[in-house]
Image (cartoon, rainbow, N blue to C red):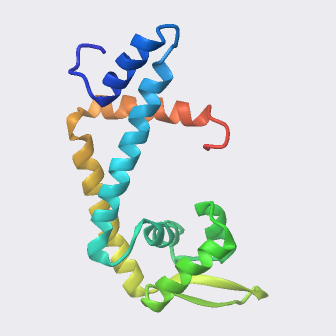
Amino acid sequence: MSGHSGDSIDAIIEQWSAVRPDLDTRAMEVFGRIFRLARAMGDDMEEAYTPFGIARGEFDVLAALRRSGEPYTLSPRQLSATLMLTTGGMTGRLDKLEKAALLRRSPDPHDRRGLQVTLTAEGLALIDQAVGAGLAAQTTALAALDDEQVGQLADLLRTLLAGTPGAR
């Protein structure tokens, strides 16, 4: 336990150790914590985005457009690939965001069959505020670590992610 006070994962590990001492539970110690952190942070992120009238899925679309740089335009296919969504799932998000005037769809001037999705001025202002709120929630969660630990954790997770098929 590295000298830290126990958490709920430690309790689970102790239970497994009592009934199955033959198991190597190191992976469970890591991934149990990752899963719990992901669930807790997912809830925190939803709460951070609620004042802006968007959920995480809509945030992801707006953020992908914002990160693309001016003119903040991508095709629905590019958005689907970036967010690993089916085109059907993407259409629902785009419909909701277009209805809220946060983005607009228009014909692609380079492909008569294609569409472009572009952030509106309202969408740009909203995503810039929402990303700040989300980062504030994440920064609060990291407050238990010092800067060096945050860097180490990011490096370790990057290495783990790179070595995990299907997670890149």
Of all residues, the one furthest to the top in this rendering is 22
The total number of labels drawn is 0
Of all residues, the one furthest to the front in this rendering is 19
Q: Quadrant of residue 18 in the image?
A: top left
Quadrant assignment for the C terminus = top right
- Residue 44 screen position, x and y as percent: 30, 56
* Picture residue at 47% right of the left edge, 34% below the top: 157
Q: Is residue 27 left or right of residue 149?
A: right
Q: Tell me, yes or no, if residue 132 can be seen here.
A: no
- Residue 149 screen position, x and y as percent: 30, 29
Quadrant assignment for the N terminus = top left
* Picture residue at 61% right of the left edge, 72% below the top: 89
Q: Is residue 166 above or below residue 134?
A: above
- Residue 75 screen position, x and y as percent: 66, 77
Q: Tell me, yes or no, if residue 38 can be seen here.
A: yes
- Closer-to-camera residue (46/113): 46
Q: Is residue 164 above or below residue 167?
A: above
* Picture residue at 31% right of the left edge, 60% below the top: 134
Q: Is residue 52 left or right of residue 114?
A: left
- Residue 13 screen position, x and y as percent: 39, 20
